[in-house]
Amino acid sequence: MEDATFEPNADATGAEPIEYSSVEVVIHRAPDPKLPYLSKNTGLVYDPRMRFHTELGATEDDIHPEDPRRIWEIYQELILEGLVDDPTTPMLNGNSNNHHLQRLQRIESRLAEASEVVLVHSQEHWDWVAGLSDLTDKELRSNAKSMDSVYLHNMTYYCARLSAGGAIEAARAVVTGVVKNAIAVIRPPGHHAEHGTPGGFCFFNNVCVATRVCQKDFPDLCRKVLILDWDVHHGNGIQNIFEDDPNVLYISLHVHKDGGFYPHGPAGDHHHVGTGDAQGKNINIPWPRHHMTDGDYMYAFQQIVMPVAQEFNPDLVVIAAGFDAAEGDTLGICHVSPQCFSQMTHMLMSLANGRVVAALEGGYNLRSIARSAVAVTKTLMGEAPARVASLYPSMDGVATVKLVISKHAKYWQCLYPKETPEERSQRLGGKRLHDILREHQAKTWFREYNMSPLILRREKLKCFEGQVLATNEPVKDQPLVVIFHDPPETSHIDDPRASRIETHNVIVTNYAEEYVKRAVRDGLAVIDVNVSPYLSSGDGSSTSKEERTSKIHELASYLWENYIEAETSGNVFLIGVGAASEAIIHLLNTHGEINFDNGTSRKPCLTLPDGTNDIVDCVFMFLAQQTLQGVNRPADDYLPAWYHQHSMIYVAENHSVWLPERLRRLRKKYGNLLKSPKTNTQDMLAEHEEEVFTRILTGTAHTVDGSEPTLANLEISTTAISTTIGPDDSMTGDHSSSGAAKDELGTPVLPSGEGAVSPLRSPLKSPLSEQPLMGSFGGVQ
């Protein structure tokens, strides 16, 4: 044994220093030349001095998410598992139940040198971080306010150097064979720190500094490096530093939400593939939402990470091991288990002759990061990973993985198809299947249902030509069903290498047509709107998501203003299927006005001044994995209450909205949610057809007898979730109050007089006075 002295440590918040006189360092046995890898130990970097970087003025009740206790919790969990020899824990001085275990081999951290850090950061950045040591508390607080998600302390520079130095020493020990692999329990984290900019709790980019040092010091042993980043946030700093380096493959799995999640913006999308000779060496797997699971991560590993990594054949694997995607983390809001982290680590250990370094990044639930880090550590030590409970990926997960593959197939031999359908169409000419199907539908529906394409007289809406079909008879006194739906579903067997499909292996399913058939049979007018995920920009290229959304909204408004509102006298039923449902939410949020006798007015939606007859009777939606959207108009408390009482929103049983933590946050603005036993929109349409048409036919009856139908009159086979407004669920939390009166249940009540609406009456009104006729739905006259 030999002794080593540590500098003063801090407690959990860094407030009070604690003296450690000495630490026992175990001298491990030399590796067996017959089993050079197996007989080596796993290295551990942990230095309690890294806890000196704390938020100024932090208290036990108000601690920043990047909490100094993060590394302490992990270290304590390693002790409890018997994986660390620590003299401060008596149970390990001969009393451990795990004395037979091969312990972790301690790797001493050190302060990173300027010459090492400036391999990836600018000299100005180094100088700025160094200068924090001389600032007053007031100056530190002032500087932090103007920066991107960081707090500052006089010890920040010291701890950032320790953190980067710990990552360097862990990587050096692995590359030189001192240990077989290593885990660095370090902070502050680093993967958001760019070349000249700190951010996201990060100052020096630890894994980048360690990678560059090893490439410089060991060019023969460490030329190609894989950096796998499973932190829930995109590692914009790693991408920024290595996007032009063909010898570094960076793969990041992160929540992106189309740029709406930290670090925000488009940098984390799948289009950023690297620059110059490094194209294809930057792979972003951007999840479109929170609540991703083990199945999604395992699917991404199996389909992208491991095939590409094996083809790249790295000399070293560095894991940017953030654990904020772990179950229980309130920033990441995902559901990755310790078993999944263990499985991913095990797969990565098959690369680079097992030379793997895991360096801690994010993770802010103390129990979650401790359990996850220990699972990774045990796997690195040689423990077989535990089984993952479910390998079933979500539809969003599969779609994201396929999107990334289509972008990167040109750069990697292991990924297929090599030519996207768009590229093939541009080269040889072609037509999209949904256009062919719609043309066929137009001909068939004209013959069977007397439906024709509507004329769209705006240049911006030319991309929807042929996609809007309507019954030809005048509908002034007819109930109207308006269906916004995604294109028909196809099932097929394709060639995975060429991405070609034999037409006889394609089955088209479009259950929305059954709704059209049923509505026509029951004497209802119909407008059927086919909303494709792909819209042409006019030059043959596809539009961006923002342009597509804008065009869909304009189409919905155009149809309302020129056909629906002008041609009907009430009893409109809106049906949304899949992503196309957003058009209905747009209508509810943006159209119309009600005027009252006392001269006041408000704009809930889809209304005209007279207010003597309902326009919209009920809204139906079918959502599989689509994001739930709520109605929302400023200063309008009435719309959410009306929407909740006049909607049937069917949501797939495996949708994240049904998770217990989500149910507590539901509001009436999301409508009357009904759990469907099906998980696919086509199956959901079939499952609930009778319920929908019972509601529609019940709704049309009140035009004759004057009664108002309510959802309470129907027998619904699905499970309804109550979103009744209570003391902790007031609509003023989501919508600013207009000072409206409310009944005993908290439901807003409109003023009395002409245009007044009871809690169960729709605020969506239309006068019976003359409207300018636009002709039949067959075309504008």
Image (cartoon, rainbow, N blue to C red):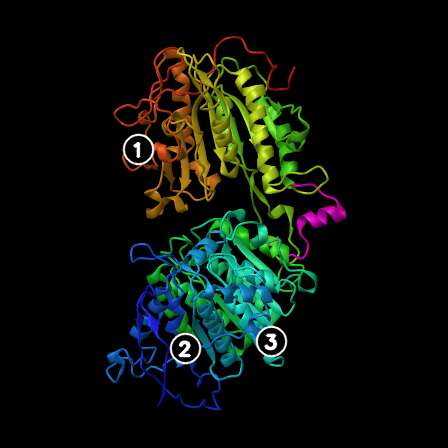
Q: Nearer the viewer, residue 205 or 294?
A: 205
Boundaries of the magenta span: 416-432
Tell me the quarter of the picture where residue 531 sits.
top right
Instruction: Tell me whether circle 1 and circle 3 mark residues in contact (CB < 8 Å).
Output: no
Disc 3 marks which residue?
215
Can the viewer see residue 630? yes
The residue indicated by pointer 2 is 381
Earlier-in-chain disc, 1 versus 2: 2
Q: CA distance from mark 3 to mark 2?
A: 25 Å
Q: Secondary structure at mark 1?
A: loop
Sequence-wise first label, 3 or 2: 3
Q: Position of residue 640 (x, y in %)?
A: 39, 29
Residue 330 appears at what percent x and percent y?
38, 53
Cα–Cα span, label 1 and label 3: 61 Å
Q: Callout 3: few (<14), some (14-19), or many (20+) C-alpha neighbours within 10 Å? A: some
Does the CB distance between marks 3 and 2 fall below 8 Å?
no
Residue 74 place in picture, x, y as percent:
35, 68
**Relative to 206, is 44 on the left or the right?**
left
Q: Nearer the viewer, residue 408 or 359?
A: 359
Q: Amino acid at mark 1?
A: Thr
**Residue in front for this viewpoint, 502 or 335:** 335
In the rendered image, the vertical position of residue 213 relative to residue 757, given as above or below: below
Q: Is residue 88 above or below residue 597?
A: below
Instruction: Give the structural element (helix, strand or loop) at label 3.
Output: helix
Give the residue pinned by disc 1.
724
Residue 499 % position (x, y): 64, 53
* C-alpha gap between disc 1 and disc 2: 52 Å
Q: Amino acid at mark 3?
A: Gln
Quadrant of residue 621 within the rendered picture: top left
| Image height of 482 relative to 311, above or below | above
